[in-house]
Image: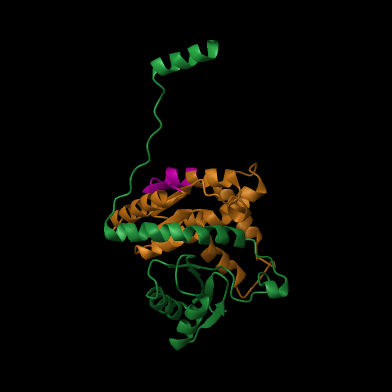
Amino acid sequence: MKVFIVPPNSLILYDLVERFGHEPLSVMKAIRERVTDLEIDSPPLNVTPEDVKKGLKYAGVEVPSGIRGRLAIWGPLIDQAEAAIMMEDPPYSFGCVGCHRTNEMVKYLLRKKGIPILEVPYPEDEEGAKRMVSKIKEFLEGLR
Amino acid sequence: MESESETRMIVIAPTSDVTPDRVVRFVHSLGRPLTIKETCYGAMVEGSKEDVRAALKEVRKLDPNGIYSKIRGFPIGDTRRCRAHHGSRPGFTQLEKEWKDLSLVEKGLSAVERGEKATEPKKKGRIPVSKLKDIVDEVKK
């Protein structure tokens, strides 16, 4: 099954989803399609007016451009998602995953979709990691 | 760049005995048409999806719970990201944090394999009224 991960570029979640036999939907794959396209319309990252229009599908025109820009890439992945794993309060909050409003919007879109969702806290100690891994394993095995 | 190509980051947990050098040599020894780059956290492997995934499957055998992987958007040596070309590497700080925490995830995976059950954290309860009264009395004094 296609599992959307939040944060969408998390190494830990990407690896665990793949390890337990599912396909992670990550932002890296979406970015790759843009940066390795032979026809680069808008260098360096090939963001085109089409992307801007795509973003409008998920957030209104009054929403800041940063949120619409992010949703232009993450939104189509959410559309494909059959399940989702969300990591709560990851200690990194900068770069492409640093926009809290986008993160809230992503959670809202996922919940609205009605797919199975697992919310796990970011592990801070050994026991936390054990809890996280066992919950993720149980969740992913239950999806089959 | 072919559409079926894939770039993978192979990240070694800090507690693992495997070194990036060993991973690189191991991938070379597989004899597959892959581009490999040694990094501080492990290695980057690039090639056709099938070759990359087959190599990753073999690499994981070196330390199943100590080697992690995710795909990378930009190809190896891409001038927009490669430091040799003064590219920016905005995702590295996140990768660094997650790399440090891989030792915890490794322990979690090993515990799950052993069938250990994780203990649930104690829920914070409400203060009983009697204790609250004691606190009020103490403050009043």
Apparent side of residue B66 relative to residue A62 in the rendered image (left or right): left
Q: Is residue A118 magenta?
A: yes
Q: Which chain is green?
A: B
Where's residue B63, x and y in %?
Answer: 39, 72
Q: Nearer the viewer, residue A119 or B95?
A: B95
Q: Is residue A1 visible?
A: no
Segment tinted magenta in the rendering? A108-121
Residue drawn where x is 33% and y is 57% of the image: B111
- Residue lying furthest right in this view? B86
* Coloration mode: by chain
Where's residue A79, x and y in %?
Answer: 46, 54
Q: Quadrant of the C terminus of chain B?
A: top right
Where's residue A24, x and y in %?
Answer: 43, 61
Q: Is residue B63 magenta?
A: no
Q: Is residue B61 visible?
A: yes
Q: Nearer the viewer, residue A11 or B121?
A: B121
Q: Which chain is orange?
A: A
B33 versus B18 height, above or below: below
Q: Quadrant of residue A50?
A: bottom right
Q: Quadrant of the N terminus of chain B?
A: bottom right
Q: Nearer the viewer, residue B132 or B73?
A: B132
A44 versus B122 height, above or below: below
Where's residue A14, x and y in %?
Answer: 45, 61
Apparent side of residue B91 relative to residue B5 in the rendered image (left or right): right
- Residue lying furthest front in this view? B141
